[in-house]
């Protein structure tokens, strides 16, 4: 299984193109964004999780608690993967600590994605309320985080322009990104080092506030785009699934029970 949080633009792209590693996406002339840019998987790999049943059988552990399934699969939208070779990350030099994490090479084509899993309470959540997680980490390197957030905005904007004939004006984006950059540049001037927000709680809180502002702007822009495309005021996740989920792809809740749209 492969979790994508609650970004419906990524969901639609996966329905169309499958799950692609950065290397495969580049070869196809596409661009993808990982859940975490500093993850343990390489550019030609996809991070996924095994079923808790398989994890328990493989490692004689329950897979509950500190598991990728609980952290990344159950809370959001995820895709079931079939007939793809995988290798466990556990006890390798790229062990992330999750007993159930596995790596898949290159790509998972749409025909190897037989089902999508969604928590039932998300189905009637409006798109504007589905969180776009930009991955803010007060103890991470700010420079890489702002670059990742900027890339995410660009990808969403490209999707909205191509799919929904709408886009986020550059000035709206820069009205948030510019103050973000200024906050850190005025506070830390590392010489060949990294800017770590955890050193200053007050500054980190200001940056987090700007991140949240950017996330809300993205959520509202995605909702506006799908509203225009589908002709539905305040579209819900259910509406997007009805219009984009291929009929051959099953729909299940996060406990594996079939659900209807």
Image (cartoon, rainbow, N blue to C red):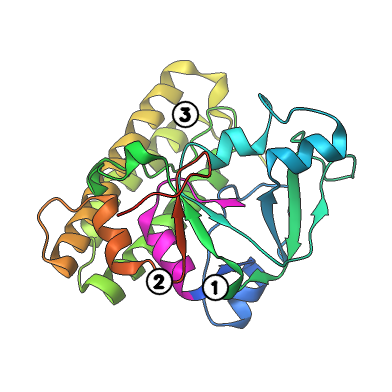
Q: Which residues are magenta?
A: 1-16
Give the camera-side residue of 1 and 151: 1
User: Taking 117 as reference, is 261 left or right?
Assistant: left
User: Among all residues in the image, which is located at the extreme top?
Assistant: 201
How many numbered badges does the structure rendering display? 3
Residue positioned 17% across, 57% down in the render: 224
- Sooner in the amino-acid sequence: mark 1 or mark 2: 1
Residue positioned 64% across, 66% down in the render: 21
Image quadrant assignment for residue 209: top left
Residue pointed to by mark 3: 187
- Alpha-carbon span between mark 3 and mark 2: 49 Å
Marks 3 and 1: CB-CB under 8 Å? no
Residue positioned 73% across, 39% down in the render: 53
Residue pointed to by mark 2: 246
- Residue 159 in the magenta stretch? The answer is no
- Sooner in the amino-acid sequence: mark 3 or mark 2: 3
Residue pointed to by mark 1: 110
Residue positioned 57% across, 20% down in the render: 199
- Residue 15 in the magenta stretch? The answer is yes
Mark 3 burial class by Cα count in 10 Å: few <14, some 14-19, many 20+: few
Image quadrant assignment for residue 84: bottom right
Image quadrant assignment for residue 42: bottom right
User: Taking 77 as reference, is 62 left or right?
Assistant: right
């Amino acid at each position: 299984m492969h979790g994508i949080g609650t970004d419906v633009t990524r969901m639609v792209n996966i329905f169309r193109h499958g799950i692609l590693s950065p290397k495969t996406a580049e070869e196809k002339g596409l661009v993808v964004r990982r859940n975490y840019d500093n993850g343990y998987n390489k550019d030609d790999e996809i991070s996924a999780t095994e079923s808790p049943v398989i994890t328990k059988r493989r490692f004689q552990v329950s897979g509950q608690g500190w598991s990728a399934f609980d952290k990344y699969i159950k809370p959001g939208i995820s895709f079931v993967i079939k007939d793809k070779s995988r290798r466990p990350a556990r006890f390798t030099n790229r062990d992330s600590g999750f007993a159930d994490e596995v790596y898949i090479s290159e790509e998972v084509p749409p025909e190897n994605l037989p089902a999508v899993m969604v928590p039932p309470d998300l189905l009637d959540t409006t798109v504007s309320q589905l969180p776009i997680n930009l991955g803010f980490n007060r103890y991470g390197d700010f420079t890489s985080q702002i670059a990742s957030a900027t890339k995410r905005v660009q990808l969403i904007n490209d999707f909205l322009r191509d799919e929904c004939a709408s886009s986020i004006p550059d000035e709206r984006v820069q009205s948030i990104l510019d103050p973000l950059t200024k906050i850190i540049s005025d506070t830390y001037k590392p010489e060949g080092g990294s800017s770590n927000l955890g050193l200053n709680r007050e500054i980190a809180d200001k940056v987090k506030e700007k991140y949240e502002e950017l996330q809300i702007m993205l959520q509202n822009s995605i909702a506006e785009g799908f509203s225009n495309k589908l002709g539905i005021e305040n579209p819900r996740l259910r509406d997007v699934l009805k219009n984009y989920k291929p009929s051959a792809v099953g729909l299940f809740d996060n406990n594996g029970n079939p659900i209807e749209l």
